[in-house]
Image: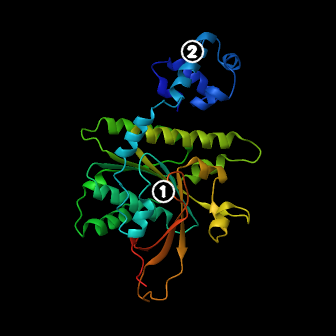
């Protein structure tokens, strides 16, 4: 959580002074240094030590996980049984996605050209097409988002003359650094709160998360890893507070023989951002490109892919589904 979120509860002068010292988030304030050390780093007259301690206590209370009874959690679980992602158009893929509902963080990874972004785009657009009360925020970190591709997928979903209202509920934000991510989420939430019609089905897609977090990771310092953990915790809090499904598209890197993914599926690649990233999310889907089957037609422009649930906190992992992509649209696999 950014400390700017506490303005005007706390004076802007104190927050600006802390940011000038490199203290920008709740994690920085709570774990980077003791209150006395922070106080000595602040410009003279910014705040008293007691005021700084009170602010630190306020931030700790806001960052703490809210307590809930078991009955409340069970009722929330029942409320999210509507499988908003049973809209892929592929029966086996629908079954794989059945338990991946809000509020969760779903990690989608795979090698270059495997179809990760197309997979996420299909899931997001079909949600918009199937639910009039849905809303999607697409965060583009590479500048590769194509409105033409989005329209083409939507045309396949809804016919040649689709209603444009689903695309009106798709917001695309372009960003290139991790700090801006917090601002984009805050602005999107403020826009949502001022919308006359609230959307009960909401999704945030980050395509891709790798450029935001990858440059921060280093073997010499743990600061980058701490920032990654803080970012995912912020996304998790955002998902839980606002009932949002978060899809994180991640690149791949070379795997070692003793890596978990290498033992699950024969591949020379694994999700980027380190092994702990997978454990920070609720589920990991590995997308792979497959060779055409023997019954594929020569004039068929489809590419063939597989989706494997290699890790999940809420359902059985190692589930597997095949699908095709044609012009960026998910299609069922060819019948054998």
- Residue 250 percent coordinates (x, y): 56, 57
- Residue 203 percent coordinates (x, y): 40, 49
Q: Is residue 146 visible?
A: no
Q: CA distance from mark 2 to mark 1?
A: 42 Å
- Residue 74 percent coordinates (x, y): 41, 41
- Say the numbered circle drawn on residue 299: none
Q: Under tag 1, what secondary structure?
A: loop
Label 1, on which residue?
A: 143
Of badges 2 and 1, the one in the foreground is 2
Q: Quadrant of residue 244?
A: top left
Q: Quadrant of residue 298?
A: bottom left
- Say the numbered circle drawn on residue 54: 2
In the image, 116 versus 164, the foreground residue is 116
Q: Residue at x 41, y 64 (%)?
A: 95
The C terminus, quarter of image: bottom left
**Pointer 1 local density, CA inside 10 Å: few below 14, some 14–19, many at least 20:** few
**On screen, 164 above or below 325?**
above
Q: Under tag 2, what secondary structure?
A: helix
In terms of sequence position, does the residue under pointer 2 or pointer 1 come before the other? 2
- Residue 321 percent coordinates (x, y): 47, 70
Q: Is residue 107 visible?
A: yes
């Amino acid at each position: 959580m950014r400390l700017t979120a506490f303005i005007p509860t706390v004076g802007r002068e104190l927050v600006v002074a802390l940011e000038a010292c490199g203290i920008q988030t709740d994690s920085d304030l709570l774990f980077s240094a003791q209150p006395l050390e922070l106080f000595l780093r602040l410009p003279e007259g910014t705040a008293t030590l007691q005021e700084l301690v009170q602010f630190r206590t306020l931030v700790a209370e806001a960052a703490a996980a809210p307590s809930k009874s078991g009955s409340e959690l069970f009722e929330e679980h029942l409320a999210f049984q509507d499988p908003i992602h049973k809209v892929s158009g592929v029966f086996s893929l629908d079954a794989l996605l059945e338990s991946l509902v809000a509020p969760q963080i779903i990690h989608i990874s795979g090698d270059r050209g495997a179809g990760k972004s197309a997979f996420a785009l299909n899931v997001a657009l079909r949600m918009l097409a199937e639910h009039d009360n849905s809303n999607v925020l697409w965060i583009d970190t590479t500048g590769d988002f194509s409105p033409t591709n989005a329209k083409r997928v939507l045309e396949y979903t809804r016919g040649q003359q689709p209603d444009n209202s689903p695309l009106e509920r798709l917001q695309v934000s372009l960003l290139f650094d991790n700090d801006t991510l917090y601002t984009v989420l805050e602005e999107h939430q403020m826009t949502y709160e001022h919308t006359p019609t609230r959307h009960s089905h909401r999704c945030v897609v980050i395509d891709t998360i790798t450029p935001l977090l990858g440059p921060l990771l280093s073997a010499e310092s743990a600061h980058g890893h701490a920032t990654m953990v803080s970012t995912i915790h912020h996304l998790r809090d955002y998902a839980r507070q606002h009932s949002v499904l978060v899809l994180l598209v991640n690149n791949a890197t070379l795997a070692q023989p003793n890596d978990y993914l290498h033992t699950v599926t024969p591949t020379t690649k694994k999700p980027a951002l380190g092994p702990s990233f997978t454990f920070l999310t609720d589920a990991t889907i590995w997308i792979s490109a497959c060779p055409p089957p023997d019954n594929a037609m020569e004039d068929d422009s489809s590419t063939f892919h597989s989706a494997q649930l290699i890790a999940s906190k809420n359902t059985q992992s190692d589930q597997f589904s095949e699908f095709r992509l044609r012009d960026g649209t998910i299609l069922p696999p060819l019948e054998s």
